[in-house]
Amino acid sequence: METEDSSSENGLLHRKQALYSSLDSCFVIQKEMYRGQQYSQIYFARLHLMRTLLYSLLPNWKPHIQVCTVIGLEEGKECIIVGTLYKHMKLKPSILEEYSKERSATPLVRPHNFMHPDDHLILEDESGRIKVCGDVLLPSVYVTGVVVALHGKETGTGDFWVEDVMEGGLPHQIERPIKSGEDKYVIFVSGLDIGSSTSNPLKFQLLVDHITGHLGDKKEQSIAAKIVRVIIAGNSVEIPRGLLNGQNLGSKDQFTLSEPIKELDIQLTQIAAGIPVDIMPGPNDPANFSLPQQPLHRCLFPSSSAYNTFRSCPNPHLFQLDDVSLLGTSGQNIDDLEKYSDANDKLEFLERTLRWRHVAPTAPNTLGCYPFTDRDPFFVETCPHVYFVGNQEKYETRLIKGAEGQIVRLICIPRFSETGVAVVLNLRNLDCHALSFGTEFS
């Protein structure tokens, strides 16, 4: 492994390297086959996983209170029930309503957020379901698909009055060895949107030149030599979908359709020639719509895929660099949470998904998801050191701590085409800062 970055006799800089291991196997769909299975099975798998976990935490939470099922509830008797939350939402879109509104004269209004004061939560297990009430479990915070343990009692009206709630909490985290180490940087960028009206080729070229060490003086080049990996978190191209109308495309339309991908391949080739690069699919990329999105096909990148430093990865993406575990998505899971719940900022949504131990709790209810039968790949088994999401409005970051001393760096990566901002992470100490590329010259 390369550890030197000082100048050699001929004045050349050596790029640092980091040991990389991919942990994406749980997100890759290989042997699964769709045979008309329903989504209930993924909920059963999730409930089984989370209930086993929550039961193991009960002795340290409230060991003196009896655990029962929904069907075994008795009026006025205190107990703990574990189940999956369902959020009844007055404004939640319905395909039948959308169809009827499209056929009417009134235009279809799509609000940014579907929350309403009358929303309420229902807890469900295999035996039944019951409406939950109280001031502890706020409908504005939770969404359909979250598994929790509730302490309370059944009321005379048939509701369950919640006195306390326990979530899964941050999972166990593999400790990083305490050592001074050396600075090694990872660059995160998303929302390149090559081919869109907001995309500026000069901004991206400046980023590429900075990463590859073709920009700046000797000092800046020595810093660039410490960049060990580039992560591209979704929405790399914008394809003119108006051309995709089911008809055979003419040569001119084929060229227009493929041009953004060709341009991306040229830029990625420049990066992959000197630095390892991971590219994840996003909602606008030529990939499958439902999570987990499968890696973009290598045939889209004939030049860059010739390098062994180029990796096409799924979304979500889980990997390890040296002793640092990183987990990230292209943003669909957080954007969906924003539609159906409320938070002070996007980082709060990230923190919730970790404490709920689930990357995409709203899948498959409101977020597209493959109908897994015997597992839930979005369950978070071990706590990452870095958790990132792409295609956000602005750059945000925060360190959060768990009850067992876990420390996680949360990162919101802004859309590069709109902000010109990439994010730099130092693997040594998890410090993070924005890297801005403007094209205004005075």
Image (cartoon, rainbow, N blue to C red):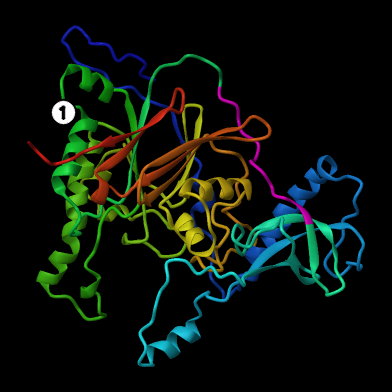
Residue 301 inside the magenta-drawn segment: no
In this rendered view, identify the residue nearer to me: 229 or 343: 343
Relative depth, front residue between 301 and 290: 290
Depth check: give the residue in front, 107 or 315.
107
- Quarter holding the N terminus is top left
Q: Position of residue 288 (x, y in %)?
A: 40, 64
In the picture of the structure, the residue carrying the numbered disc 1 is 215
Magenta stretch: residue 165 in it? yes
Q: Is residue 257 above or below residue 191?
A: below
Q: In the rendered structure, which segment of residues is drawn in magenta?
A: 163-176
Q: Residue 236 location, x and y as percent? A: 28, 53
Dominant secondary structure (helix, strand or loop) of the stretch shown in magenta: loop
- Residue 292 can be seen in this image: no
Q: Residue at x 13, y 41 (%)?
A: 439
Image quadrant for the C terminus?
top left
Q: Residue at x 87, y 60 (%)?
A: 68
Q: Amino acid at mark 1?
A: Leu
Count of marks placed on residues? 1
